[in-house]
Amino acid sequence: MAIKVFFSILLLIIVQSCRQENHVRTYRLPKPEKSSQKQKIETPTSGFSWEKPENWIPSAGSNMRLASFDVPFSDAKGDLSLIKLSGTGGDLESNINRWRGQLGLASQSLSEMKKNITTKEGKLGEYQLIKLFNNQSNSAFLCAIMPVGSQTLFVKLSGGLTGIQESETDFISFCSSIDFLE
Amino acid sequence: MNKIANFFKHPKIFVITIIWMMVLVVLGTIEQKHSGLFAVQERYFSSWVIWFSLFPMPGGRLTLIIMLINLSFFFFNKSIWKLKKLGIVILHLGGILLLIGGGLTAMFSSEGNMVIEEGDKSNHIEDYHYMELAIINTSSAEFDAYTIFDQPLLIKNNILTHENLNFEIEILNYLENCEPDKRTSSPAIQYKGMLKNFMLKELKPEKEDNWNRPGIIYKISNSGTSTDGMYGIFLGQPVVQTISVNDNNYTIVLRRKRTYLPFSIGLIDFKKILHPGTDIPKSYSSDIILTENRAVRKILIQMNKPLRHKGYTFFQSSFIEGPDGETTVLAVVKNYGRLFPYISSIIMCVGLLFHMFQKLPDLFRKSREKVAT
């Protein structure tokens, strides 16, 4: 008797786990909330100087940023941020893949990214310029990563494809002009 | 009935199955180098049948079920229920519990990631390996109605229907790994959505399963509208596919299989401690808020101190750090068979000890007789 009960339960579990209806589910969820302003805990301390194009307008940004600018484009405006992190702030590959993720692009290996990375020379030494475009969503980033001693500066300009291409020269000039405050 | 019972309880079955499992472990270990851990687990240990070219052989799941049946027939055999065989009875009980625990884990456990940015919260985990096709009816102002088709249904030529949907979806192809490729020529008239501008190019699957980007080519039909046509979708598609059928708006997303939790976790702060003078993390932790039925609890999850709640275990697994803030990655496991290996191991140890102490007098007697002769 005991063995019959045991195998009946075993068979029931196996059959239950194989039922195809388990692979279709329905449920209702409330509409996703609009993203709220996130808390930033770091307090910036500047100590750098830079030269910016006249038409860039300082904006509120967030506590984490050393500087924020609204960058006017011919068709809209972009957002530029300057941020300082201690250490390297993560390796190049993970930083670029994070930005790619923000643009809705799939991750790439470092060798695949190489074509989007160029090295530039600024007042603080060499830095890397990264261009990321998503043609499908008409969004793009221009980013610069500058190692400064035991810290790293990150500059990011986000906006539409046309605007980013228009502002590339200004962006490079701005990044190259960043220096220690005398 | 007796003949069947005598056949299934035969010790040779146990010996054969345990040897076959050893062979599978060796084969799986060798193939893991080339195919990756998940592919090997699916082929050798989670399968009912393994095909070696044209020859079918029992997979790990079938082998272990045969082993369980064999042990069970032996365990329920009246001839072993004697005091002098108590050790053997206990040992078999431990083995049966171990296999039942393994079965529960294989059938009902889930594991995945919960990724939360600082200041954000989440109430779902995403599976490491399995995908789902989510059809979301966004027409209501109050809620979104989800109809989810799991990965086993996303196979070529399968037609997906449901009473919540007033159209059919036929899976024309499921691509394990793919990338969108810009069309160079004008698209055929039946192509809709993303397929108007892109093709999905099939790529060789990566060794590590979660590096793959799956995609689906599917056909919508019987909607009675111009929405009918061929569509494409892939994991992480930046612009989601939306369609409209008879005043109902739908969003179609291919995503990692989601399991929603009866509570939510918000990340207040992620902390990282470095080894002095280096950029190498010594430890990292997540200061979180667990919210359940309006009750709020503040908890610290550390590398070796996971959070256990409602059967789920949250381990501090990884983190993402960048200029836009920090993000914690928690590995989440729910395993109904979690305690079985511990309990069954203890039972088997007790069984072996019993058996040893029961046999000791005989061993001493034989030893004395040997010395005497």
Image: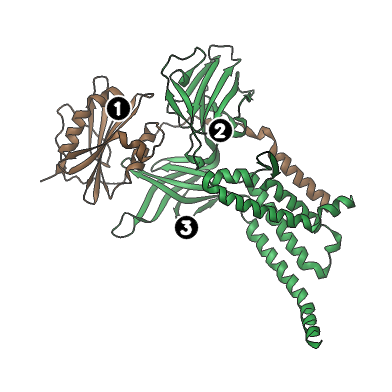
Q: What tint does the image give chain A? A: brown
- What's the amino acid at mark 2? Glu
Residue under pointer 3:
B304
**Residue B283 spot, x, y in % from top left:** 39, 56
As helix, strand or loop, the secondary structure at mark 1 comes to strand
As drawn, the label of residue A159 is 1
B73 or A74: nearer the viewer: B73
Q: Which residue is mark 2?
A: B132
Question: In the visual, does B214 lie left or right of B96?
Answer: left
| Residue B38 placement: quadrant | top right
Disc 1 to disc 2, C-alpha distance:
32 Å
Q: CA distance from mark 3 to mark 1?
A: 42 Å
**In the rendered structure, the residue with mark 3 lies on which chain?**
B
Q: Position of residue B57 (x, y in %)?
A: 70, 44
Depth order, front residue of B116/A161: A161
What's the chain of the residue with tag 1?
A: A
Viewer can see residue B224: yes
Three-letter code for the amino acid on which mark 1 is drawn: Gly
Give chain B's shade.
green
> Which residue is farthest right?
B2
Quadrant where the image shows the C terminus of chain B: bottom right
Q: Give how far apart the Cα atoms at labels 2 and 3 are.
A: 32 Å
Q: Residues within 10 Å of mark 1 (few under 14, many from 20)?
A: many
